[in-house]
């Protein structure tokens, strides 16, 4: 019976892996009831690495090339001392292949808005998404920490873990970058670089190298988006605050016109007969932007008592907010409003 068992044994003389499809990170060469023939050849292609495992321990890692496996020519391996002396011909061992190609276009994103801290705005909730690429660079570490003894380990098996790593490190990436939040939101390249710097060590801990990271979109809360739009507007006019105020005045005219029929600030002013004066002030501010030579005379006419129209508008808006919150009564608001509008005529 023992003789028949020996005759039935199958010996392996060629060990290789040709990837049939994308997405496989680790693959175990099938060796059930088979043994490696003394003198067998191991072929490792340029996009691969091979790991020999003996009695549950990683014995050696083989790079690209053709390797002859004999008890005499097997190298003194890095991880086990003189392990080739332990084998007789034929010998048994587990062989795992690892793909070292880049795994491209891996998606990441925030399923729900995440909260990050910013020195200017405090707690900010944002959504973002993009993609990244990585490859296996340390197969021994990846084998012991991630893939283990499975017959195959795929990109899909690892996807959830890597997505979680990205989300976990977004807040730390923003904090450690030293870049203002609004600058990160406006410059997605800087955001991606900060995130990549934060994530690279985390990938290395499991035998991977992060090859690239992109941020394709950052969605801000509506109120912060308005701040960002204003910052962009200021950048367009440079450091000339006069021009920026004229730009804001031009934007405010249609808003006041809309609020006239809704009982807003402009509507209340119309009811008191002061809306015309307010409209004149807005028009004068706009005219100053179109005719720089007339800026000084217009300013003198618009505010003879030394009160700037934009200051009055700001005060009116603050008073309206206090009224909306119930801090001021309607009578108190109307009285203050009338007092301020008299300074414009």
Image: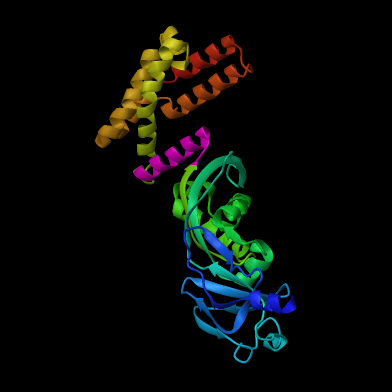
Q: Residue at x 64, y 62 (%)?
A: 147
Residue at image coords 54%, 16%: 336
The picture places residue 190, in percent across and down from the top left corner, at 48, 55
Nearest the viewer among 230 and 161 is 161
Occupied quadrant, residue 307: top left
Q: Residue furthest bottom?
A: 72
| Magenta stretch, main secondary structure class | helix
How many marks the image carries: the answer is 0
Left or right of 77 in this view: 23: left
Residue 162 visible, this orientation? no
Give the residue displayed 58% in from the left and 17% down from the top.
Answer: 323
- Is 139 colored magenta in this rendering? no
Of 298 and 194, which appears nearest the observer? 194
Q: Quarter of the image for the N terminus: give it.
A: bottom right
Q: Nearer the viewer, residue 128 or 73?
A: 73
Asked whether residue 106 appears in the rendered view, the answer is: yes
**What is the span of residues highlighted in magenta in the rendered image?**
219-236
Pinpoint residue 328: horizontal percent, then vertical percent: 61, 16
Q: Does 133 sit left or right of 161 as displayed? A: left
Q: Position of residue 203 (x, y in %)?
A: 60, 62
- At horizontal 60% and vertical 55% (from top left) the residue drawn is 158
> Split into 4 quadrants, where in the image is the C terminus?
top left
254 lies above or below 11: above
Q: 305 or 188, which is in the foreground?
A: 188
Q: How is the image coloured?
A: rainbow
Against 81, is 266 above or below? above
């Amino acid at each position: 019976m023992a003789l028949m068992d020996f005759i039935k044994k199958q010996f392996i003389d060629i060990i290789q892996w040709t990837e049939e499809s994308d997405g496989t990170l680790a693959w175990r060469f099938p060796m059930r009831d088979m043994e490696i023939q003394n003198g067998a050849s191991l072929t490792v292609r340029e996009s691969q690495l091979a790991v020999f495992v003996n009695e549950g321990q990683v014995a050696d890692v083989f790079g690209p090339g053709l390797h002859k496996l004999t008890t005499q020519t097997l190298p003194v391996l890095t991880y086990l001392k003189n392990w080739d002396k332990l084998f007789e011909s034929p010998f048994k061992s587990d062989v795992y292949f690892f793909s070292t190609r880049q795994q491209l276009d891996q998606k990441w994103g925030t399923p729900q808005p995440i909260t990050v801290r910013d020195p200017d705005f405090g707690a900010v909730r944002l959504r973002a998404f993009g993609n990244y690429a990585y490859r296996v660079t340390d197969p021994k570490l990846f084998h012991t920490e991630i893939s283990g003894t499975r017959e195959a380990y795929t990109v899909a098996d690892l996807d959830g873990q890597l997505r979680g790593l990205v989300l976990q490190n977004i807040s730390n990436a923003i904090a450690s970058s030293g870049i203002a939040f609004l600058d990160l939101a406006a410059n997605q390249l800087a955001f991606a670089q900060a995130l990549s710097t934060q994530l690279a060590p985390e990938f290395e801990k499991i035998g991977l190298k992060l090859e690239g990271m992109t941020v394709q979109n950052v969605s801000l809360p509506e109120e912060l988006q308005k701040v960002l739009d204003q910052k962009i507007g200021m950048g367009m006019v440079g450091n000339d605050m006069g021009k920026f105020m004229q730009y804001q005045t031009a934007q405010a005219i249609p808003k006041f016109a809309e609020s006239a029929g809704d009982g807003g600030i402009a509507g209340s002013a119309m009811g008191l007969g002061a809306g015309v004066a307010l409209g004149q002030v807005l028009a004068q501010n706009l005219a100053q932007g179109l005719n720089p030579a007339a800026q000084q005379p217009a300013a003198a006419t618009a505010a003879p008592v030394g009160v700037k129209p934009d200051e009055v508008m700001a005060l009116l808006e603050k008073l309206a907010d206090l009224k909306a919150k119930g801090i001021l009564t309607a009578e108190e608001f109307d009285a203050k409003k009338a007092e301020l509008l008299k300074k414009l005529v």
